[in-house]
Image (tube, rainbow, N blue to C red):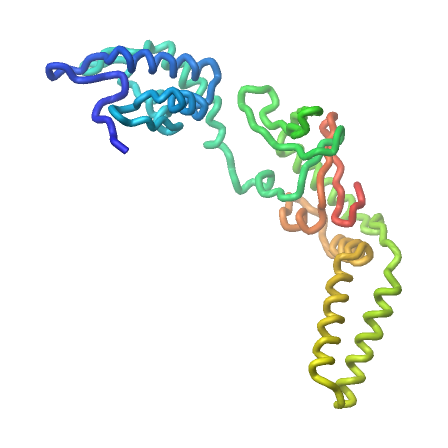
Amino acid sequence: MKNRNIPYGYCYENGKVIIKKFEVEILKQIFEQYLQGLSLLDIAKNLNEKEIEYAPGVIGWNKSRLSRIIDDKRYLGNNFFPAIVDQTIFDKMHELKEMKNTQKKTDRQSPIFRMEVPVRCSSCGKIMRRRYDSRTQEHCRWVCTNSNCKSIIGIADEVFLQQVIDKLNMAINNPDIIEIPEESKTQNDVIFKMNLEIENSLESGQFDKTRLRKKIMECAAKKYMEIDNAYYIASRLKADLEEASPLSTFSIDFYHQTVGSIWLRSNKTLSLVLVNGQKI
């Protein structure tokens, strides 16, 4: 893609830099749309759809290119470049850009960005997404993805995470609250008999290798299936809670090990649904 050797909105004439009227009109549209709240991506899309050239024969507007235009102080005017935008508009654009630029303060290693289990809306049960907007009173908000619900709950990340810690500590301090369902006796009897047959065959020394290998694989498969049953999941969860020490800080590993989902209520409180389906 071709690069301009002079900022958009200007051209050379008789060795001097002058304003290029058509491009200045495009610049004014860009500045106006940005101040009206359009994103740089949307503005770029509009320019590309209208086939507005950035350089002769080149249509290639994008977020980075527009960002550089908004940051270019040469548009304020100096000894070489005539003024295209006044200081007031320039300052307003940068105030808006500063408010939108939340990424520079974002720590992507924070647990809030590493939580893989879903956060659900207590009103409708649908998934909620975290949104950050520095222009609102409560910067962190959880928004329901259900278009018929549209529930929005403002809650600070530290408050959200502390509630998770508190709920997990309740379970750690009292692991007996975990409800253990009845063990599947039928499945266990089948596995017991298969293990006994395998052991007897090995001890006797008289067996068909192919048939024994098949029996061992069948037994392993049934044991693997047993891992996913309700009794095993609840028992494993209770054991994990009994071995854990109360949390002083958020542990992302323990969280993923024990929590299946989070349900967020409009009063900014939450419930945890543990991996065994039990809510606390």
> Residue visible at 65% across and 25% down?
154
In the image, 49: left or right of 211? Answer: left
In the image, 155: left or right of 104? Answer: right
Q: Is residue 114 above or below residue 233?
A: above
Q: Residue 31: image x %, image y %?
A: 38, 15
In the rendered image, the quadrant that contains the N terminus is top left
In the depicted view, which residue is nearer to us: 204 or 77?
Answer: 204
In the depicted view, which residue is nearer to us: 93 or 187?
Answer: 187
In the depicted view, which residue is nearer to us: 216 or 262?
Answer: 216
> Residue visible at 77% across and 87% down?
203
In the image, 82: left or right of 60? Answer: left
Residue 239 appears in view: no
> Residue visible at 73% across and 44% down?
168
Q: Residue 125: image x %, image y %?
A: 74, 33
In the rendered image, the quadrant that contains the C terminus is top right
> Residue visible at 30% across and 23% down?
54
Q: Residue 172: image x %, image y %?
A: 76, 49
Residue 48 appears in view: yes
Q: Quadrant of residue 234?
A: bottom right
Q: Residue 243: image x %, image y %?
A: 74, 57
Picture mark count: 0
Residue that sits furthest to the bottom in the current view: 205
